[in-house]
Image: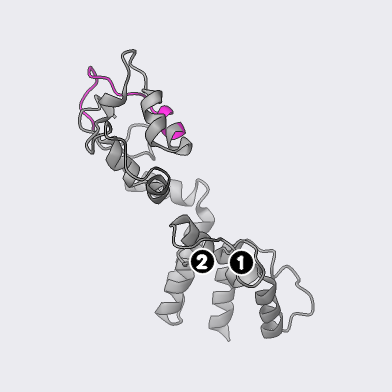
Amino acid sequence: MGNGLSSCLKKQLLKSPYKLRIQEQLGEYPNDFPKARRAISLVDSNGMWNLSLLSEVVLRAILNKIVALQPPCVDNPDDSMAWAGSNDGIFSVSYAYYITVVQGNYQSYFWAEAIWNWKGPYRISIFVWRLLNNGLPTNSQRYMRSLSDSTACVRCQKIESVEHVLRNCPWVKDVWRRLRNLVSDDGFFSQDFGSWCVGNLEDGGDE
């Protein structure tokens, strides 16, 4: 962010994962918070973020992210798009690859490779990919989107996440033990979920 004359904070908020929570908690925005509120108008006379105004219209989690940013200043250059993955804000394929494979996402990269190179039905690859990207409508996900009144599993009342539905629910564990003739769990239920999904995918392809 530069001078804050073109950045619209309202649009940024509505694109955030907190969109539905904001609407649920606040309903309509205050009348003095116009639809096209520019970032520069959220700075006080001392050049700092106007916390009293911001605290009225955003959740604390969002407010904390905003105040961590350098406030805009009219003397700065125009606002422009920048890539957060580099210090200079310039995107490069080589550095994106470095971040993906070398800096912490190495395992995810090879999970993706295993899923999309699998020789079985394509629809199963898509399903496993959705699992690893939290893309199933579990109760925890539906609750976050105000589509459910509870995060609980209907079987055991624990939080219904993707991992819970596919592996960790006691009812599901019993099914897995019968399918795989497990005498003991032998680490089957304690693997990290990504490796567990990919491992089962590959085992299924070999059978």
Quadrant (top left, top right, bottom left, bottom right) of the C terminus:
bottom right
Magenta region, residue range: 64-79
Q: Is residue 95 left or right of residue 111?
A: left
From this view, report whether residue 16 is shown above or below residue 149. above
In the drawing, what numbered circle is on residue 164?
A: 1
In the drawing, what numbered circle is on residue 138?
A: 2
Assess disc 2: are there few (<14), some (14-19) or many (≥20) residues with their C-alpha within 10 Å of its C-alpha: many
Question: Outermost residue toward the top?
Answer: 46
Q: Residue at x 22, y 36 (%)?
A: 36
Q: Residue at x 65, y 63 (%)?
A: 158
Element type at mark 2: loop
- Asked if residue 134 lies in the magenta stretch, the reply is no
Residue 107 visible in the snapshot = yes
Q: How are the residues colored?
A: one colour
From this view, report whether residue 192 is shown above or below residue 167. above
Report the Cα–Cα distance between label 1 and label 2: 9 Å
Give 72 or 10, whichever is nearer the viewer: 10
Give 1 or 198, whichever is nearer the viewer: 1
Please identify the quarter of the rendering in which residue 193 is found.
bottom right
Please identify the quarter of the rendering in which residue 33 is found.
top left
x and y percentages locating residue 9 in the rendered image: 30, 35
- The amino acid sitting under disc 2 is Thr
Element type at mark 1: helix
Q: Is residue 76 left or right of residue 172?
A: left
Q: How many marks?
A: 2
